[in-house]
């Protein structure tokens, strides 16, 4: 009997097409068990890979403005850092707006405040013409012409950590000798207005205020009360 090549060798096995069930009678490839401690890999469906869970973080970029707005609604104005001309304009606008709304006190929070001489005098002038009383609360280090803003408030209190520094403002001018003399006269006039305000509030002589500012006198809360700069220490209510 003669055997043909086709009858002596079995036909080759053809693996099933992916995504289709195997034909009956065809052998199946052995399953590979997953490694211990490792989950089996996720098989994406035909609709696409599974979407991972998303973590949403709140947008905190605008929180300072929201806090200041809520404080403003409660008639609380915050002044901190360097009080220059731009900051003085903004502070005066807030004070004037609250003054025009209704007759209730305004709380002025002065936190670590320093000020340029002209800017401080601008705020002092607005505080003098407000109809409503202003209650000032000082915290951190309040120094230089910013003390004039504090002295212009009807009520003056300080937090236990407050420090007050009587000091002359730092100034710099450029120009001809005539312009420098003009600037010196202008600064002298503005300093006199500042020291007169501090003297009227504390009950001290202008020369004493000027001498303390030249040597940079520091005052704690208790010393500031004895000096006459503030009336009392702020307490919980």
Image (cartoon, helix red, strand yellow):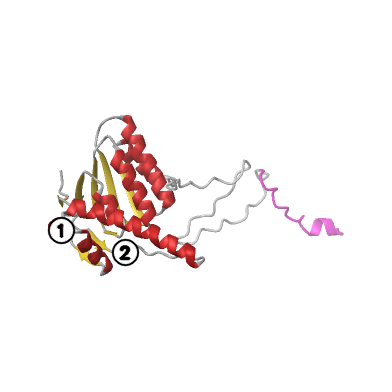
- Of residues 106 and 184, the one nearer the viewer is 184
Residue sitting at x 58%, y 49%: 43
Q: Position of residue 118 (x, y in %)?
A: 38, 53
Residue 102 picture quarter: top left
> Does the segment drawn in magenta span residue 220?
no
Residue 67, by quadrant, is top left
Q: In this view, does 129 lie to the left or right of 49?
A: left
Q: Residues within 10 Å of mark 1 (few under 14, many from 20)?
A: some
Relative to 45, say whether 131 is above or below. above
Q: What stretch is highlighted in magenta?
A: 1-20
Q: Quick check: is 9 in the magenta stretch?
A: yes
Residue found farthest to the bottom: 215
Q: In which quarter of the image is the C terminus?
A: top left
* Residues at discs 1 and 2 in contact (Cβ within 8 Å): no
Q: Give how far across and how far down residue 47 sits, in percent.
A: 62, 41
Q: Which badge, 1 or 2, comes first in the chain's sequence?
A: 2
User: Would residue 64 appear left or right of 135 to someone viewing this image?
Assistant: right
At horizontal 76% and vertical 56% (from top left) the residue drawn is 10
Characterize the local packing of mark 2: few (<14), some (14-19) or many (20 or more) Cα atoms within 10 angstroms. some
- Secondary structure, mark 1, is helix
Dot 2 corresponds to which residue?
168
Q: Magenta: predominant secondary structure element?
A: loop
**162 w.r.t. 154: above or below:** below
* Horizontal and vertical percent position of residue 66: 38, 41
Q: Name the residue under label 1.
A: 227
- The disc at residue 148 is none
């Amino acid at each position: 009997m003669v055997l043909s090549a086709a009858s002596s060798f079995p036909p080759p096995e053809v693996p099933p097409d992916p995504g289709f069930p195997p034909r009956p009678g065809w052998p199946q490839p052995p399953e590979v068990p997953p490694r211990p401690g490792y989950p089996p890999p996720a098989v994406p469906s035909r609709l696409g890979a599974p979407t991972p869970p998303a973590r949403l973080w709140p947008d905190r970029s605008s929180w300072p403005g929201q806090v200041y707005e809520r404080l403003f609604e409660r008639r609380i104005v915050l002044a901190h850092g360097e009080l220059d001309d731009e900051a003085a304009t903004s502070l005066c606008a807030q004070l004037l707006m609250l003054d025009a709304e209704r007759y209730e006190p305004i709380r002025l929070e002065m936190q670590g405040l320093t000020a340029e001489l002209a800017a401080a005098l601008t705020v002092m002038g607005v505080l003098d013409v407000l109809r409503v009383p202003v209650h000032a609360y000082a915290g951190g280090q309040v120094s230089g012409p910013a003390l004039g803003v504090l002295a212009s408030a009807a009520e003056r209190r300080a937090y236990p950590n407050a420090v007050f520094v009587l000091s002359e403002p730092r100034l710099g001018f450029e120009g001809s000798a005539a312009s420098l003399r003009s600037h010196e006269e202008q600064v002298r006039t503005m300093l006199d207005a500042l020291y007169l305000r501090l003297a009227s509030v504390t009950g001290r002589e202008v020369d004493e205020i000027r001498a303390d500012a030249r040597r940079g006198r520091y005052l704690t809360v208790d010393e500031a009360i004895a000096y006459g700069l503030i009336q009392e220490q702020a307490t919980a209510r």
